[in-house]
Amino acid sequence: MVVRVAVNGFGTIGKRVADAVAKQPDMKLVGVAKTRPSFEARAAVERGYPLFVAGDGKLGDFGAASLPVAGTLAEMLEITDVVVDASPEKIGRENAKLYEAAKVRAVFQGGEKPDVAEVSFSALANYGAAKGRHRVRVVSCNTTGLARAAAVLLPHFGIAAWEATLIRRAADPDDPKRGPLNGILPTFKLPSHHGPDLRTIFPDLTIATTAVVVPTTLMHVHVNHVRFQRPPKDTNTLLEAFRASPRFRIFEEWEHVDGTPQVMEFARDRGHGRPDMMENVLWTNGVRVDGAEAYFFQAIHQESIVVPENIDAIRAMFELAPDGPSSIAITDKTLGIGTR
Ligand code: NAD
């Protein structure tokens, strides 16, 4: 079975998901929808993706830009089995009404509240919960990073308590408007929303999260302090648990990756086309077990970490793979995740 997939909202997340869908053997990208002409709309056309007009967009504006349009969002929905909504935060909830009216299944992003969907999703954590569903929400970039780590730590060691401080990038690299340019902004929601969001996947998890925003565009970094129920023997045992999981990239001390600039240089060197880092990034010298507790840093590439999760969500909804590991294996192979 080949599932017909459309992407509504072709920005940071949407364009990456569209490219990823186009690489799947069991999915067909039927189109992408944009509200107005832009360099990204032009790129969609140049990639051969049928371009549809969404929201308050006007067909005439695309005509004036000489961008061929295949139709309206409503017409795109007529030829699709599932739409990935990658429109800006809170717009997805509005769009949900259109998807429901068109009787099309939908995958939403973490900018929407959890109740936009039947289930919040992260592939390593709860693949099975999305099986056969009609509306699934892929949690945000930071929550995805935490959910993957929880999916490794919980079965191996149990978690008695977890504190995570999220050092958040100020803006995506293409965004000239957001800041701060110079400053560190505490998030005055205490605890931050990330812990409660993670509990939409792991309801019984004891986790407290706080966040600060810093002037960088490259990645987020999480500073984690965990107390275990069944502590690992030593640091190496904990590292081995992370190493054994898909979707983690662990840098050795001798690689001299001091921080996010070199992580993203690695991603550029890796040469997958777009320089993305879809794995959780850990450092061997950034993981330390201390008695029943552990510390670990992880870096999260906000622009791309949720991309494989969107693919696995679709595969789960249409039961295209028997289980999570089988879907993850296909996704990771097609997207080059876990290579070098
Ligand atoms: P973005 O602003 O880069 O892209 C959104 C796109 O949707 C733009 O091209 C915009 O023109 C278009 N759009 C605007 N109104 C629309 C409408 N009514 N219908 C369809 N398209 C419309 O945003 P993004 O960063 O890709 O975020 C999309 C979603 O993904 C949000 O829910 C966000 O919270 C979530 N998310 C973002 C990141 C990130 O770091 N960028 C990470 C994880 C999840």
Image (cartoon, grey):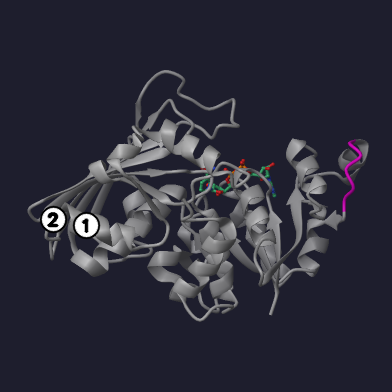
Residue drawn at x 65%, y 43% as measured from the top left: 11
- In the image, residue 322 sits, relative to residue 123, either above or below, namely below
Q: Which residues are magenta?
A: 65-69
Whether residue 116 is visible here, answered yes or no, is no
Q: Which residue is mark 2?
A: 234
Mark 2: amino acid: Asp
Q: Does dot 1 land on a helix, a strand or a loop? A: helix
Residue drawn at x 35%, y 25% as measured from the top left: 184
Locate the N terminus and report the quarter of the image it occupies. Answer: bottom right
Q: Which quadrant of the view contains residue 222?
A: top left
Q: Is residue 69 left or right of residue 243?
A: right
Q: Position of residue 169 (x, y in %)?
A: 44, 34
Q: Is residue 172 left or right of residue 244?
A: right
Quick check: is the Cβ at mark 1 less than 8 Å away from ligand 1? no
- In the image, residue 262 sits, relative to residue 99, either above or below, namely above
Question: In this orientation, which residue lies closer to the viewer: 306 or 261?
Answer: 261
Q: Are marks 1 and 2 in contact (CB under 8 Å)?
A: yes
Question: In this orientation, which residue lies closer to the viewer: 37 or 47?
Answer: 47
- Is 243 in the magenta? no
